[in-house]
Image (cartoon, grey):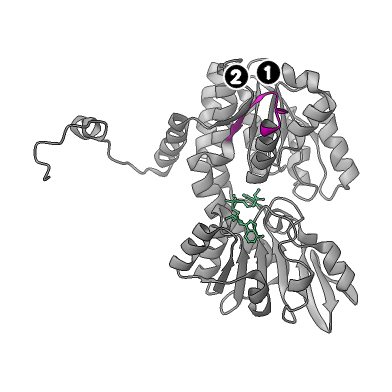
């Protein structure tokens, strides 16, 4: 993770986070460990808990505690109660900056210890679903601190969601099932940044891709990209592999399960385990058995439907999540967002704020530099032309 490493080196010499208590509620992976270490290099005291009960890499958690003095509250496969207890343990540390992937820590702080939120410097949010919640809190007048929408940084959306989730979602499905994607029909429900990545990668591996959408613009984009676009109920009869990535609830439910083919595989890459309606599936199933680790087979009207990872994020539950090269960009963005919050302490009003465009360019510049890629710069004339209303001398009318 060369970009984060460079930021960590600068942090070590400038110590911009000296004395700041930071609480991180992120997937406990090797990449997150590097972010935690960069923040510690900047002078912060850091504690970490998981953003999902299934996403913790236990060896990483142990190494952070044993070798880096970072408190970690997470264990792979923890119960929901234990998970909640771990988020509460971070609240008890009274963080002044929080980093979330799904808003669990910042919302618990608001609910349980609102007086702590008032003395917070700010927060960052890594994922779409978290931002939906935080914007809803802001609209209700309930959000009491500034939050930087790291998820909406250009370097985050374009790379993390499209390439990171796209590849790792298919990686999780293949690792869990060993299914051949070439020739299969993959139904992607939701064609946002993540859905686009999943659809592109499935197509690249030789699958026929059907997209289901509710937004006409996104549906049109999918169609013009060359994908078949169908209502989910029609697609349900055709698909071999279903991947939900909408951020919405029950996008695959009883009516869809009832018409799916024998052997269909159901996976979710959306943040919460609500996109595939498990209660509906269990209600209509005549039987259930474990066929492989993370693969449950439900018998529905004589057909077998295979649910992966109980409908939890498949790229984290069944694979390693996003590759380090893409998390390098995301976590460089996180590190710079934390620095920006601390340097601007008390300048930002409560609410959801965009990641500063100049920092976005800096992350991309550092990454290009690490890749040894050089690019052009605007000439002074070009720069002036782009911001002027005066036509250039050689411009045709
Ligand atoms: N697994 C991961 O590592 C990972 C990474 C990034 C984002 N996410 C999560 O994936 C989800 C989607 O994120 P995004 O950034 O692509 O969001 P997005 O809002 O850009 O896209 C979601 C799309 O789903 C569509 N949609 C909503 N309800 C639908 C329905 N019932 N049927 C069909 N389409 C529907 C929306 O119109 C939208 O185009 C979120 O929950 C996000 O938190 C997961």
Residue, disc 2: 342
Residue 181: x, y in percent?
60, 74
Residue 359 can be seen in this image: yes
Q: Is residue 148 magenta?
A: yes
* Start-end of magenta stretch: 139-149
Q: Is 72 placed left or right of 268 in the picture?
A: right
Hey, which residue is sitting farthest left in the picture?
Answer: 394
Q: Are marks 2 and 1 in contact (CB under 8 Å)?
A: yes
Q: Secondary structure at mark 1?
A: loop
- Label 1: few (<14), some or many (≥20) within 10 Å? some
Residue, disc 1: 20
Q: Is residue 30 magenta?
A: no
Quarter of the image for residue 287 reads: bottom right
At 47% across and 61% down in the image, what residue appears?
221
Residue 48 can be seen in this image: no
Compared to residue 116, the image places residue 83 above or below, namely: below
Q: Earlier in the sequence, mark 2 or mark 1?
A: 1
At 66% across and 42% down in the image, what residue appears?
132
Looking at the picture, tell me which residue is in the foreground, 367 or 255: 255
Hey, which residue is sitting farthest bottom in the picture?
Answer: 302
Residue 176: x, y in percent?
72, 66
């Amino acid at each position: 993770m060369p970009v984060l490493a460079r930021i960590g080196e600068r942090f070590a010499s400038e110590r911009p986070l000296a004395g700041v208590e930071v609480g991180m509620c992120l997937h406990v992976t090797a990449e997150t460990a590097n972010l935690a270490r960069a923040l510690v290099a900047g002078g912060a005291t850091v504690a970490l808990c998981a953003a999902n009960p299934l996403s913790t890499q236990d060896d990483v958690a142990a190494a952070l505690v044993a070798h880096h003095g970072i408190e970690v509250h997470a264990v792979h496969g923890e119960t929901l109660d234990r998970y909640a207890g771990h988020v509460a343990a971070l609240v008890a540390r009274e963080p002044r900056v929080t980093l979330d992937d799904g808003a669990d820590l910042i919302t618990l702080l608001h609910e349980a210890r609102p007086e702590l939120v008032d003395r917070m410097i700010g927060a960052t949010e890594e994922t779409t679903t978290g931002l939906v919640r935080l914007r809803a809190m802001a609209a209700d007048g309930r959000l009491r601190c500034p939050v930087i929408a790291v998820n909406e940084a250009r370097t985050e959306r374009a790379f993390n969601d499209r390439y990171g989730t796209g590849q790792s979602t298919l990686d999780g499905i293949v690792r869990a099932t060993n299914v051949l994607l070439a020739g299969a029909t993959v139904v992607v429900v939701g064609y946002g940044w993540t859905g686009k990545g999943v659809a592109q990668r499935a197509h690249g591996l030789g699958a026929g891709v059907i997209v289901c959408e509710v937004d006409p613009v996104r549906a049109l984009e999918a169609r013009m990209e060359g994908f078949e676009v169908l209502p989910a109920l029609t697609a349900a009869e055709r698909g071999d592999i279903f991947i939900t990535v909408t951020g919405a609830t029950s996008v695959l439910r009883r009516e869809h399960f009832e018409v799916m083919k024998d052997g269909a595989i159901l996976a979710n890459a959306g943040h919460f385990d609500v996109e595939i309606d498990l209660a509906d599936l269990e209600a209509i199933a005549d039987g259930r058995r474990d066929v492989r680790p993370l693969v449950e087979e439900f018998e529905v009207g004589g057909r077998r439907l295979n649910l992966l990872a109980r409908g939890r994020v498949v790229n984290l539950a069944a694979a390693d999540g996003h590759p380090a090269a893409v998390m390098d960009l995301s976590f460089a963005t996180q590190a710079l967002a934390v620095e920006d919050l601390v340097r601007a302490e008390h300048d930002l009003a409560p609410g959801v704020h965009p990641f500063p465009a100049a920092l976005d360019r800096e992350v991309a510049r550092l990454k290009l530099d690490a890749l040894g890629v050089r690019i052009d710069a605007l000439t002074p004339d070009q720069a002036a032309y782009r911001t002027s209303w005066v036509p250039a001398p050689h411009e045709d009318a």
